Image (cartoon, rainbow, N blue to C red):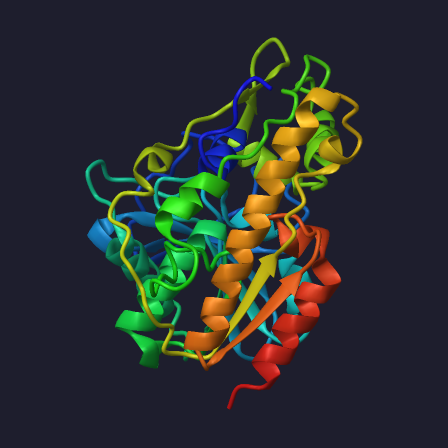
Amino acid sequence: MNALAATSLALIASIFASAQWAATATAAVSERPTEAAGVWRDPSPHRVRFVTGEKNVALEVLDWGGSGRAVVLLAASGCTAHEFDDFAPKLTDRYHVYGITRRGFGASGFVAGEYGADLLGGDVLAVIDALKLSKPILVGHSFAGEELSTVANRRPHRIAGVVYLEAAYPYAFDNGKGMSMDEFQQIVSEPQSPPPTAEDLASFSALQSYFLRMRGVRWPEAELRQEWEMTSDGVAKRRRFPGSAILMKGTRKYTDIPVPALVIFANPHSLGPWVDYNRDDSLRPAIEAYSSTFEAFTRKQAQALRDAVHTARVVTIPNANHFVFITNEAQVLREIRGFIASLH
């Protein structure tokens, strides 16, 4: 097969690369309309705010409303808070739901040379302060596990709990008994799905169909519009996010999660329908070897968390996608609601 993607984080970033970021906000919290009149409008029922984070960077914050305890959603590498556009409204019947777009991604600001786990965690705390949230639940997808762990370890009294959605890999928890960073680097390379054709790039709806066909995930159109732009000749082109190049810099090693935690893994890990229906027999040995290694390392990581973090509920969903909150929405919602209900 022609090569494996560099890492799953880099793969997500390459699928969703962008260079659109915000003008500086003039106040700690400001608001703007979701879309200007006369153009496509994001159907997700949120307000868009900008909150000043660390180093005076403007952070995009989505507010889906709701009542009850605050829940703050943190996006994956390469994505924005709009990846939760379809998922977040399912939580507003019980909670007030927010989402944060990480610095250097989407509409959030960026300062060259500023990076690291503590900086990203500081941004989350800045939003909590600006919105006056009392002990919210942080829910992070993929690389957002780093933000969850840095806040939980540095400021455990500021939050009520954390939820790792395919996010508790070694950048978020590494006590030497689970998956190592070297092992993580072995398993984060995924067999590449076929690239989009000209027809797939002809519209945002065509792109949605492509990702559903290849990855088994139908992304919200607002997320696609953050990551792609339509050129003058009507062809979708990836944007670039300046934060992608430095995201793995400044990571830390966390050996504990000192707050209540819900940890959800997809294992065995689904690569998407294109693998299930691939008829090229030459690809099967590499795919099967990759899947077997990924399954073993993830199983070891899940067991290490069960053994060491006694505040954690660790759940494994077989054959789920990395975007588990989309592909297995009902089960993830059940787990989150049950976890929050168990907190005092």
Please report the residue visible at 70 percent of the width from the left and 38 percent of the height from the top.
272
Name the side, left or right, on which 199 lies relative to 171. Answer: right
Query: Would you place residue 305 above or below residue 47 in this image?
Result: below
Q: 42 and 188: which one is in front?
A: 188
How far from the left and from the top, in percent, is residue 195?
63, 20
Residue 302 x %, y %: 52, 64
Q: Quadrant of residue 10?
A: top left
Image quarter in which the N terminus is found: top right
Q: Is residue 175 left or right of residue 194?
A: left
Name the residue rendered at 55%, 34% in the picture. 190
Picture quarter containing residue 325?
bottom right
Q: Kindly identify the residue that appears in the image at 55 percent across and 45 percent down.
A: 293
Q: Measured along the vertical axis of the image, is residue 85 above or below residue 162?
A: above
- Give how far across and how far down residue 324 sits, in percent: 64, 54
Query: Do we see residue 56 in this rendering?
Result: yes
Place residue 179 in its image quadrant. bottom left
- Say if residue 166 shows up in the picture: no
* Camera-side residue of 150 and 130: 150
In the displayed orientation, state which residue is furthest to the top: 233
Q: Is residue 184 above or below residue 298?
A: above
Residue 221 x/y as whole percent: 65, 38
232 or 208, which lies in front?
A: 208
